[in-house]
Image: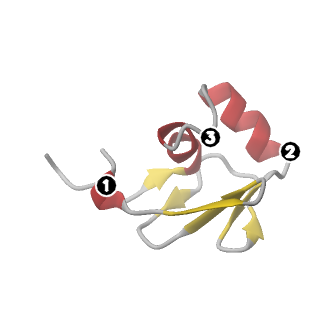
Amino acid sequence: MPSLDYIKLDQFLKQMQVVGTGGQAKLMIQAGEVAVNGEVETRRGRKLVSGDRVEVDGQAWIVDLSQLG
């Protein structure tokens, strides 16, 4: 299985089961409810790489691409 270089923010939120659909992810991101590395991120296509920190509603995840895909 090829390793991923990145994962898009909306896909990551779905993988982590923060949201059930891409539409929910889009709305959450556009509403400014998601932070990446401490900064609010409003682009759902933001490319995440291993080590990035994603925060939603006080919960945080560290991106580990080796665990995804």
Q: Which secondary structure, mark 1?
A: helix
Looking at this view, is 28 or 67 the one in front? 67
Ranked by sequence position, the earlier of labels 1 and 2 is 2
Q: How is the image coloured?
A: secondary structure
Give the left or right position of residue 7, taking residue 9 as reference.
left
Disc 2: CA contacts within 10 A as few (<14), some (14-19) or many (>=20)? few
Say which amino acid is labelled 2.
Answer: Ala
Q: Name the residue at the front extreme.
A: 59
Q: Residue 67 at x, y = what percent?
A: 31, 54
Q: Identify the mark at residue 31; answer none if there is no mark.
A: 2
Which residue position is annotated with label 3?
18
Residue 50 spot, x, y in % from top left: 41, 68
Check disc 3: other Cα within 10 Å, few if <14, some if 14-19, many if 20+.
some
| Viewer can see residue 45 | yes
What residue is at 77 percent from the left and 40 percent from the top? 28
The residues tagged by marks 2 and 3 sit, at their Cα atoms, a distance apart of 15 Å
Q: Look at label 3 and name its amino acid.
A: Val
Q: Residue at x 68, y 26 (%)?
A: 23
50 in relation to 68, above or below: below
Viewer-proximal residue among 32 and 19: 19
Q: Which residue is mark 1?
A: 67
User: Where residue 69 sits: x, y (%)?
Assistant: 30, 44
For image coordinates 78% across by 35% down, the residue present is: 27
Q: Count up the numbered dots.
A: 3
If you read the primary sequence from the N terminus, does the residue marked by circle 3 or circle 1 appear first? Answer: 3
Could you say whether the residue bearing mark 3 is in a helix, strand or loop? Answer: loop
| Front tag of 1 and 2 | 1
Quarter where residue 35 is shown: bottom right
Image quarter of residue 24:
top right
Q: Amino acid at mark 1?
A: Gln
